[in-house]
Amino acid sequence: MGMRLLLIVGLVGLVFVAERSLVAAESRPNVIYIMADELGYFEPGFNGGRTIQTPNLDRMAAEGLRFKNIFAGSSVCAPTRCCLMTGKHSGHSSVRVNGGGTPLRADEATIASLLKPLGYATGGFGKWGCGGRDSTGVPEKHGFDVFFGYYDQVHAHSYYPPYLIRNSEEVPLAGNVGTSGQTYSHYLIHDAAMTFIRQHARQPFLAYLPYTPPHGNFNIPDDDPAWALYKDRDWPEPARRYAAMVSLVDRQVGEVLTLLKELDIEQNTLVMFSGDNGGADYFVSPDHPRGVHSANKNPQTGVEYRGSKGTLYEGGLRVPFIARWPGKIRAGGVSEHLGYFPDVLPTIAEVTGAKAPAEIDGLSLVPTLFGEKVAGRAQLAHEFLYWEINGHTAIRQGRWRAVRPKNSTWELYDLELDPSESQNVAAAHPEILSKLETLATKAHTPAVEGTFSKTERHERDRRAKFGQQDNPHAPDPLTGKKPTANVARPVEMPTKGLLSNKDWKLVRVSSENVGNNKYARHAFDGNPATLWHSRFADTAALPPHELVIDLGTERTIRGFVYLGRQDNGWNGAIKDVEFAIGSSSDTFGEPIIKTQLAKKKAPQTVECPSARGRYVLMRARSEHGGGQFASCAEFGVIGE
């Protein structure tokens, strides 16, 4: 989903020295980050747009620095937000699908979690998209004191939802039924953001404003001043509504800038604005084959960018991006620097004095923003930029760009000669393509998503798009599928023939992921909603993965039962498994069982010849997803 990004960093007493910045603890800079959803590259006036009025953004660009080559983290909403918040590209990020509520992992750092320990008040207002309610990805678990708006992006399609979410709790909106109503949600979100800024103007704060317009239902009240600008244009009504929503956001950006001046923090404020992914070719007609508002076609030169939102060609990833800071950033500048969303986190970390995590992929933009002399170093350049989504892959290195559509072969484009990606030159430059293929392979790691403790409230939020939040039998708004009767209930372990685990003890485990509480003891705690997962944070543990359990006394053993994770994920679902029995926890002979488990949520019983022993070893050698992890909701032993 195309979104705009406005980052405001207030700075007092900041001194850049050598390769880092020193920030006095008593004068931490403020950070405001505003995103407006689904704005195309060429739609705003500062990038050449001719159909939509954006005077405040145009002024912001004239007074600051315009970036021509900052790209989105992904070509759709949720994955690009994850890249933005975590500083990772989509080959390393946890949210790589656009289902609506896929969560961050509990242990992942975000911009907010880096700033909060420094004494920042942290607030978010708009659309989160990195984890639905009751998941490990909710914003209040990732550094935000408050988040008001939408957690699930399907919920965010409606501007008249029955309720918004504040810190995982519902805030009713009077008179709204999902598709229509009395309370325009975005007005409340913007008002809350402005209030937050006022309340914290004299202390360090982070205000993250991922605004929803103009994406979703193209809807704006008829009495909004922005509608008057377009209501009589000879475009289809959705095209007029869309333009009005962009101008609404432009007006609100102007209100934020005015507020900063009123609060006397304008001179200490960095403002950045961008789109979050490529624009959609909305409102196509014979006269406008790339859409009325020309999101991916330069209205002045006619140069087109191939593809649009959802693809990994240039049109799916190019975003408008500007930065303004009176007295700090040279007005009217234009930068050709090649970067993308992972660069935002290290940039904010540097100007605020926070420490960026070591495993990020982004590079700070500070030398470009303020000059290499102020920064004390030259601007670092990426070796390459990398993207992946839904089986599609793209990589860029300088002038060269390689794209591999799903279930197809690699294509190669020379952007210096062919910015529209119209001529595949893979056959003419096999050595360049081979190098990019190798880099792309190294850039990809298996995705490890966060988890839900339960999904009822998350599904409720999705149904709220159509005012069906109280109808658990309503179809999912995104897939159209009706829920099954026991969709959210974990499968229970069988009881017949299983040994009691009351006296069991964990002797050792090869690894466990402590950061999000996926402990080994969960494999036999009697609660199918919890699970053990091998370590994936920091340095991932490699297979085989082992659990050794003390049964408390010697038993006759005839097999085991494995129950896979009962949430919506499959990461770590064990495929090749071994089972051994011993009288000592230190020594096990040959496994008595070597088998393959199925990929399913139901309990799987595996029997073996009777054997005596007090200790059992379960060894996972592979997983169904082809990754390197192991997980288990419950593990039982058959015997007496």
Image: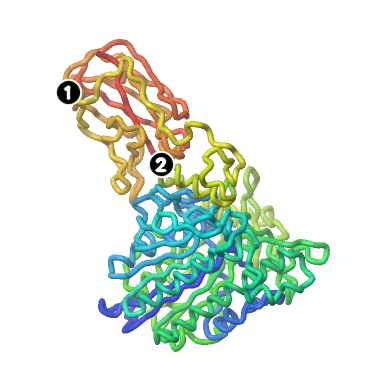
Q: Residue furthest right?
A: 286
Which colour scheme appears in the figure? rainbow
Which residue is at the front of the view, 239 or 324? Answer: 239
Visible residue check, residue 418 = no
| In this rendering, position of residue 555 left or right of residue 158 | left
Which residue is at the front of the view, 569 or 412? Answer: 569
Residue 447, position in %: x, y?
Answer: 46, 46
Residue 10, position in %: x, y?
Answer: 39, 79
Q: Secondary structure at mark 1?
A: strand
At horizontal 76% and vertical 65% (from top left) the residue drawn is 236
Whether residue 87 is situated above or below residue 488 in the rendered picture: below
Residue beneath disc 1: 552
Residue 100, position in %: x, y?
Answer: 52, 50
Visible residue check, residue 261 = yes
Which quadrant would the C terminus be assigned to in this image?
Answer: top left
Q: Amino acid at mark 2?
A: Lys
